[in-house]
Amino acid sequence: MRFLVSPSPDLQDRVRPPVRWFLVFAALLVAGLAAQRGLAGGLTPSGAEAHYLGADGLEPVPAVALWEELHANAFVYGFLLLTLGSLLAVAPVAARWRGALTWAGCAAALADLGAPFAVVAARGLGLLRVAVFAALAGALLASIAVSWVSLGRPPRRADA
Amino acid sequence: MRDPRLDPFRAPLAIFLAFVLLQAGSGALLFAAKLGLGAGELAAYYRGSEGLRGPRTLEGLLEVAVPHLAAIPLVLFVTLHLVAFAGTVRRRPFVLLAALSFGSALGGIAAAFGVRFLWPALAWAKIAAFVGLEASLAVWLGLLGLLFLPRGRAARASRDAGPPEAGGGPPAPLPVRGWAGPAAPGRAARPTPAPGYRR
């Protein structure tokens, strides 16, 4: 964290390679999550509904399993958003774009955590599950791209 | 926030805090739903109960223990790092609370094996360790949350959070941190101090 709060050109040069390696892994993680969900049928509304409600819609996933999914994903999303948000915080882009990316990622992650509960409660809403995951993946990949491009660059404006 | 250098990081810190809260809350819920709230229920969960379910296998225990051995220390490490960086707590309470957190985490994981293979009464140790971990995590998150109070209120709350060091007396003033810029009139410039907890 020191390189973020006390940046210096020398320090920035040293941290750029490991941070970029982290960003590669973060992008791979997002791709992996998408692939995992795709293989489980979670990238289509009907597939998501079948996953959470059963093939005939009569065997919903138990509540404990939904909480287990939330428990595990909150760990991943929390760390990813903390790291990407911290990198964005020092990125030389307009404050409104930084804020928009950070909070969009947070809102999409929270929605993604809550969507399975909504699918089970409403006996539908598979489209919601797909849409919030698409929003989450988009926000995370955009944050990764901005962090990659802007890491170590001097601020362009006083507010940036 | 007490350290102006942390101002740009308010959003990611708040988000991290919210997600750790979600994790801790869902962990408590899962503990109650799966293991139960009493020592008898918990021992039955691990050792099995006649006619209902068999004892947990070693593979089943490891399936839960291994991810938690990675995740819990990581969450604690990062949370403690952020609290230490922000300097919202004195050194001694920081060290004690850190020991309580990590000790509870380790005790909770070990107690699951103990209940299953050694002694059912260790269920009490498992419950105590879980409560200790959740309570200490709540304190850490509260300390992290102090960063979001205005500076005056944060300083008062921080003084209340940790008892004065040996010798009593009022707590030491907060270290002055900030960007290395021009010194205030009548004040010698000094290098930016390294972040850390208050001593």
Image: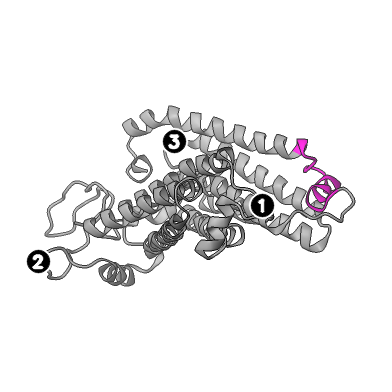
**Element type at mark 1:** loop
> Label 2 sits on what residue type?
Gly
Range shown magenta? A38-54
Q: Does residue B123 show up magenta in the picture?
A: no
Q: Nearer the viewer, residue B124 or B24?
A: B124
Report whether residue B101 is seen. yes
Foreground residue among A120 and A88: A120
Name the spot of residue B33 as percent of width and height, x first.
61, 61
Of badges 2 and 3, nearer the viewer stands 2
**SS under mark 2:** loop
- The three-letter code of the residue at mark 1 reads Arg
**Cα gap from disc 2 to disc 1, whole angstroms:** 57 Å
The answer to the question of whether label 2 and label 3 lie on touching residues, with beta carbons closer than 8 A, is: no
Residue bearing mark 3? A153
Residue sitting farthest toward the left: B167
Horizontal side of residue B188 vs B136, given as left or right? left
Q: Quadrant of the N terminus of chain A?
A: top left
Q: Nearer the viewer, mark 2 or mark 1?
A: 1
What colour scheme was applied to this rendering of the protein?
one colour
**How far from the left and from the top, in percent, is residue B22?**
55, 58
Residue, disc 1: B53
What residue sits right under mark 2 in the picture?
B167
Query: Tag 3: residue type?
Result: Arg
Are tags 2 and 1 found on a single chain? yes
Magenta span has A51? Answer: yes
Q: Is residue B142 above or below residue A128?
A: below
